[in-house]
Image: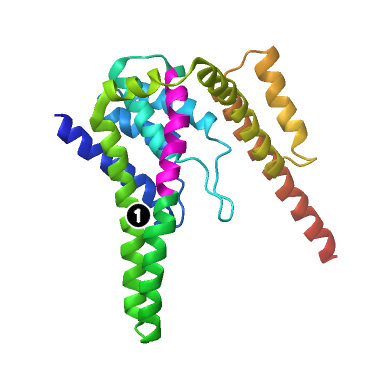
Amino acid sequence: MQITQTFLIILIAFFAYMHSYVGSTMHNRPIVVAPLVGLVLGDLETGIKLGATLELVFMGAFPIGASNPPDFVAGSIIASAYVITTGQDFTNAVLLAVPIATLVLLIDNVQMTVLLTWASHIADKFALKGDIKGVERTQIIAGIGNKIILACVVGLGFYLGVPFIEKILAYIPDYVSHGLDVAAGIIPAIGFAMLARMMVTKKMVPFLLLGFLLAAYMEITVVGIALMGVVVVLIYLNFTNESKEVVEDDNEF
């Protein structure tokens, strides 16, 4: 049973890592990966809740240029599996996800400096011969091979199991754990701030404040606010389209 689950975990990790090969569909995010882990381990509900929790933690984690963020795929998968199989509190998922994501990032960086650099030299040799197909093959093999290795690392972490993970946690000093808890509380705020900076304009601020007031003073759920937001957007679009039509009709005369 564990072998089968490990194989499925590797497939989930590989599926997540390959997101950039189909136009970066963002299916590597925790909110997608954690429910898949829950589905494999027989607890989809907990997987969905963990996905939402870990998405808040890693919301601000995006690759910018040559700078890669912590490997939230590995962190989300292993942390979700740990919580689901042990029944631990969700805070333990956050505590585990951040250091694991950082560790796997180091492994990925080693691959980038060794495996992919070596593959680049091979591609250069094909390019000197004018063998374009050889360059393409090298790129595909090296790129997919990198993701297979990372997926196997995730599968190994799952296979080693809870005792191994608990040993890792036992070596984490209390002050580090406390620091990670504080960081986990700050990271979602940073993520929201980054998103707000990109999305919020002067025209959108009233809608943002409206949503906040509805949640804070009328105790409307997030789903309810989202549905009300859909209605507001449809009304806004209808009025905008009508205004354009009136302007076009005036121009005709």
Q: Provide the residue designation for mark 1.
A: 146
Q: Position of residue 217 (x, y in %)?
A: 70, 12
For the point 36% across and 75% down, the residue is 135
Q: Quadrant of the C terminus?
A: bottom right
- Name the main secondary structure of what is drawn in magenta: helix
Q: Return the residue nearer the eye: 188 or 208.
A: 188
- Provide the residue span drawn in magenta: 92-108
> Does residue 29 appear left or right of residue 218 in this picture?
left
Estimate the x, y position of residue 29 in percent, counting from the top left: 45, 39
**Front residue (pair 160, 252):** 160
Residue 196, image x, y percentages: 69, 37
Q: Quadrant of residue 66?
A: bottom right
Task: Tell me if 61 is positioned left or right of 1 in this view.
Answer: right
Question: Which of these two is toward me, 113 or 20?
Answer: 113
Q: Is label 1 in a helix, a strand or a loop?
A: helix
Q: Residue at x 14, y 29 (%)?
A: 1
